[in-house]
């Protein structure tokens, strides 16, 4: 059931960014701009449809997920083993596992708060230089 929900949400997000945000080749926002009501499947008559663009985004995301899971297999198995004996994994323990078992992972990529998100950091740099 969990993966079904994840797939549904990923499909809805991919469709939304193409359908309502203009992030695909189809330069138009179709219909409702509210993500909650964006259809999971869009029917249009263009040769390069919104559905195809959303499907391409999902395929790229799947490839990245598969590469990441394979690369971080040791980390994932160790975390799963830990969680089989413990109810949860706190932030400190998560960091410990990442530092110990993650492959090619930059700890600076961990987002602690909104100040570290790329777009905010980038915007602040631009604002300083004006």
Image (spheres, rainbow, N blue to C red):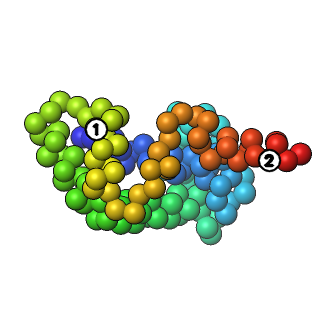
Quickly name the residue at label 2.
126
109 horizontally vs 84: left or right: right
Residue nearer the viewer, 19 or 9? 9
Quick one: SS at disc 2?
helix
56 horizontally vs 78: left or right: right
Q: Residues within 10 Å of mark 2 (few under 14, many from 20)?
A: few
Is any atom of residue 69 visible in this view? no
94 horizontally vs 127: left or right: left
Q: Earlier in the sequence, mark 2 or mark 1?
A: 1
Q: Residues within 10 Å of mark 1 (few under 14, many from 20)?
A: few
Identify the residue at the far right of this view.
130
**Residue drawn at 31 percent across, 65 percent down:** 71
Q: Nearer the viewer, mark 2 or mark 1?
A: 1
Quickly name the residue at label 1.
93
Where residue 21 sits in the image (x, y, percent)?
Answer: 66, 47
Where residue 104 sits in the image (x, y, percent)?
Answer: 39, 63
């Amino acid at each position: 059931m969990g993966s079904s929900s994840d797939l549904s949400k990923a499909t809805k997000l991919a469709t939304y960014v193409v359908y309502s945000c203009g992030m695909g080749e189809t330069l138009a926002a179709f219909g409702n701009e509210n993500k909650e009501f964006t259809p999971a499947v869009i029917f249009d008559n263009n040769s390069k449809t919104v559905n195809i663009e959303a499907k391409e985004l999902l395929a790229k995301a799947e490839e990245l997920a598969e590469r990441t899971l394979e690369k971080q297999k040791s980390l994932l198995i160790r975390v799963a083993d830990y969680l089989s004996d413990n109810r949860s994994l706190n932030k400190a323990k998560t960091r410990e596992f990442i530092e110990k078992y993650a492959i090619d992972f930059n700890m600076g990529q961990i987002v602690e708060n909104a100040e570290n998100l790329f777009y905010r950091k980038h915007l602040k740099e631009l604002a300083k230089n004006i």
